[in-house]
Amino acid sequence: MRGTFGGNPRVTLSSRPVRPVGSVVKYTAMGERTVKVPKLVAFDLDGTLWYPEMYMLDGGAPFRRDAGGAVFDAAGERIKLLGDTLKVFAHITTHQDWSDTQIAYVSRTEYPEWAIPCLQQFPVPGHPRGLTLFDISAHNEIYPGSKLAHFKAIHKRSGIDYADMLFFDNERWNITEVSRLGVKSSGLSMFEQGAAAAGDGKKHKHRQKKANSIVFG
């Protein structure tokens, strides 16, 4: 990522030896390398981490993961993580520069009772303790309402300044709203999410929305 984590560049975590996404590399007068990373990284869920969105599912919970790692709802519909989501979380949770960074989920979904068990089905690759996406989060603000309420709750609980928070969301108006608090946002590669990208070729009867692709590399 170019510049500070307060800009809106494309997320480009690479397998090459580069600095962590969202970080700022500086050097002291003695030439020592220092890395500044956000104290908290917050992720939306629907259309940002996964697709279909929870409201699109016919089956919902309970979810299951097959032997190949694919996750399905109770009706057999597959939920796919977008872009390089797992690589991003693996990087944040295993890279030493991010050891003090907290992860949060902020979602306005009307189905938190589905979103949480769905998060529990996705293990973070390479995590030494075998934790899931749900396990690694310090804050779960997953309920209908304003993202402002989500971030205010996180700020009150954690004591972390808004300016030290980095936010990923596929809805521009959510980003605009929380920016009033001083929360920083990072741009993501956008694409129109259709049935083919959903993984099963089935046409969803619901309105299609823009979804994010978190790119690693």
Image (spheres, rainbow, N blue to C red):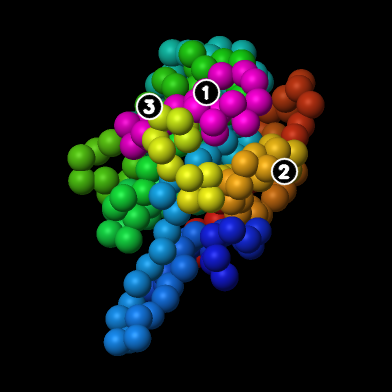
User: Spatial distance from mark 2 to mark 1, Cα to Cα?
Assistant: 19 Å
Query: Residue 102: horizontal and vertical position, in percent?
Result: 38, 43
Residue 151 drawn at (x, y percent):
54, 33
- In the rendered structure, which disc, 3 or 1, sits on the residue that comes first in sequence? 3
Q: In the depicted view, which residue is nearer to us: 79 or 43?
A: 43
- Residues at circles 2 and 1 in contact by the CB criterion of under 8 Å: no
Residue at the (37%, 26%) spot, across then down: 120
Question: Rounded to the nearest whole Å, what is the CA distance between mark 3 and mark 1?
Answer: 14 Å
Structural distance between the alpha carbons of marks 2 and 3 = 30 Å
Residue corresponding to mark 1: 142
Residue 18, horizontal then vertical, whole percent: 42, 72
User: Left or right: where does residue 23 sit relative to residue 212?
Assistant: left
Label 2 element class: helix
Circle 1 — which element? strand
Name which residue type carries label 2.
Answer: Thr
> Which residues are drawn in magenta?
132-153
- Can you tell which mark lies on residue 176? 2
- In which image quadrant can residue 62 be found? top left
Give the residue drawn at x 79%, y 26%: 207
Q: Is residue 15 visible?
A: no
Mark 2 or mark 3, earlier in chain:
3
Pick the residue in front: 140 or 210. Answer: 140
- Mark 2 or mark 1, whichever is nearer to me: 2
Residue 120 image label? 3
* Relative side of 62 to 199, left or right: left
- Which callout, 2 or 1, points at the residue further toward the start of the chain? 1
Residue type marked 3? Gln
Quadrant for residue 156, please give it: top left
